[in-house]
Image (cartoon, rainbow, N blue to C red):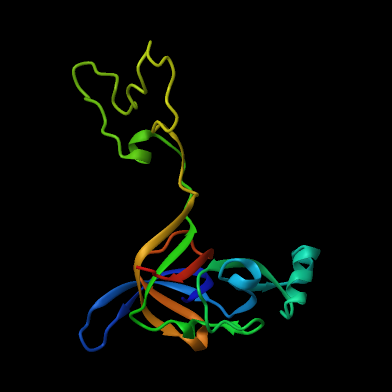
Amino acid sequence: MSALIGKKLGMTQVFDEESGVVTSVTVIEAGPCPVVAVRTPDADGYEAVQLAFEPVAERKISKAERGHLAANGVDGAYRHLVEFRGHFGDAVQGEPVTVAIFEPGDKVKVSGIGIGKGFAGTIKRHNFSRGPKTHGSHNIRKPGSIGASATPSRVFKGIKMAGRMGGKRITQVGLVVHEVRPDENLLLVKGAVPGPKNSFVEVREAGR
């Protein structure tokens, strides 16, 4: 199991000099992430590893978090602290994890907070069909009926309606590592990942 915390820098294109093939990639600045804690079934009841990312001034994190990092042998303060479930056999507490754990061709999945779209109607938010535009119809972009009247005399929970769109946690699966640049702490992933530029993302080895 391999995992890293990173920051999405944006998308670009990579050209293959031999074949001339153009590949769209997302550039992720991942790591180095110091290992804060290693959870084991004997001590904690489950397997996991806790990683930190993005050094910041100590005043920007809570006193409890500073004490947690210091107690586990991690110098300095970090903005993000994430725990990944799974078996990490080579994880050593206090040691940094870098992009070198991945290789080109590795299948990964990336989690992040998707771009918020604001308030949206049902056509944009849920891909509803619109009504007719002719013959005096007033139902052009309206959602239509949301339930029966007398029975059950209420609207069921979970009915697709207009509301805030986006801004939720998304995990994009089926991604492939295109290139790894350990000197620059960069990971080039083929395809698009959730979130806007400079957003916080989690990169994990795909289980399937």
> Does residue 17 appear left or right of residue 33 in this picture?
left
Q: Nearer the viewer, residue 138 or 152?
A: 152
Quarter of the C terminus within the rendering: bottom left
Residue under the image location 78 percent in, 64 percent down: 64
Residue under the image location 37 percent in, 63 percent down: 173
Please provide percent x and percent y for residue 190. 34, 72
Q: Nearer the viewer, residue 46 or 10?
A: 46
Please provide percent x and percent y for residue 10. 45, 68
Q: How many marks?
A: 0
Q: Is residue 32 something one can see in this rendering?
A: yes
Residue under the image location 26 percent in, 30 percent down: 130
Residue that lies at the very extreme toward the top in this rendered image: 150
Quadrant assignment, res 57: bottom right
> Does residue 61 appear left or right of residue 164 in this picture?
right
Residue 95 drawn above or below residue 130: below
> Does residue 100 appear left or right of residue 129 in this picture?
right
Please provide percent x and percent y for residue 160. 39, 33
Residue under the image location 63 percent in, 85 percent down: 95
Q: Is residue 50 something one can see in this rendering?
A: no
Please provide percent x and percent y for residue 77. 72, 73
